[in-house]
Image (tube, helix red, strand yellow):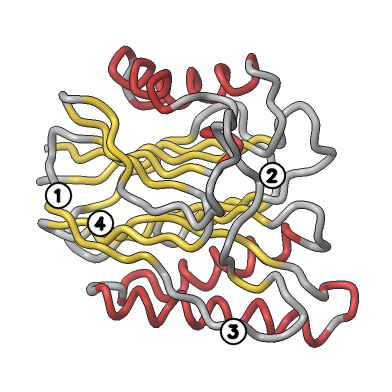
Amino acid sequence: MPYITVTALSHPGLLRDHNEDSLVAGPWTLCGTVTENPQTLVFPLGTPLVVAVADGIGGQPAGEVASALTVRQLAAVGPGLGSEQAVREALDVCNRAVYAAAGRDPELSTMGTTVAGAVVLRESLVVFNVGDSRVLSVTEEGLHRMSVDDSPPLAPGHRTTSLVTQALGGTRTYNEITPHVTTAPLTPLDRYLVCTDGLTDPVPESALGDLLRAHDTGRAAFELWKTAIEAGGPDNITLALIGIGE
């Protein structure tokens, strides 16, 4: 019987004093914790399975609250996310929930988070994101970006930016979101990487591709984390590797 494997890891990095990232894989959530050892979960292929990361916006209060709220909401509705429209509606609910929570507590004012992930269906993958966390496919030909960064144009000579042009929450007054949502065929030989920018900012995608071609499952997740740490670990690092087994 075909099955889905999800190998996940979350770590604050070397410079942050706490972890504002969160992760969801099916009903399982990981919020603001440390897992230097990758955790592998196995799920049956069939019922929609959501795998996503959320990265609390740095420099603003309670990013860890916004990211945790988002992944817990996705975990609650995950089995019903069988279409692009269902995913868009779920992200809208997450956005409204972040604003509502911020409005109830002055200490949470302007909290926000990015989110990126995929819903694994029997024959396809619904990929989504708001902000600059990413979803990438790992094929025999290399690494391919499936998400779309919500970032302003890069300054000359710069490879990355910490600025985002949309997020869930993040402002004092409510802003609607326009999520990026696409559907792609599910290819059993491919793997899919869902991660926050704590991985992709310090480690170029070419290096990520080399590591993923050289290693499988838990070792691959560990090597990705280690490479980001060796590059300075400037931000929280959260990632999930999705694979299909027979």
| Residue occupied by mark 4 | 120
Count neighbours of disc 3 (C-alpha within 10 A) and say few if under 14, some if 14 to 19, many if 20 or more. some
CB atoms of marks 4 and 1 within 8 Å: yes
33 in relation to 90, above or below: above
Give the residue type at disc 3.
Arg
| Image location of residue 94, percent across then percent down | 54, 76
| Residue occupied by mark 2 | 33
Q: Earlier in the sequence, mark 3 or mark 1?
A: 3
| Residue occupied by mark 3 | 96
Q: Earlier in the sequence, mark 4 or mark 1?
A: 4
| Image location of residue 19, percent across then percent down | 73, 44
Any part of residue 219 in sight? no
CB atoms of marks 2 and 1 within 8 Å: no
Secondary structure beneath dot 1 equals loop
Give the residue type at disc 2.
Thr
Q: Earlier in the sequence, mark 3 or mark 2?
A: 2
Single out the mark in the foreground, 3 or 2: 3
| Residue occupied by mark 1 | 186
Give the residue type at disc 4.
Val
Which residue is pictured at 33% across the width and 42% down the height?
145
Label 3 and label 1: CA atoms lie apart by 31 Å
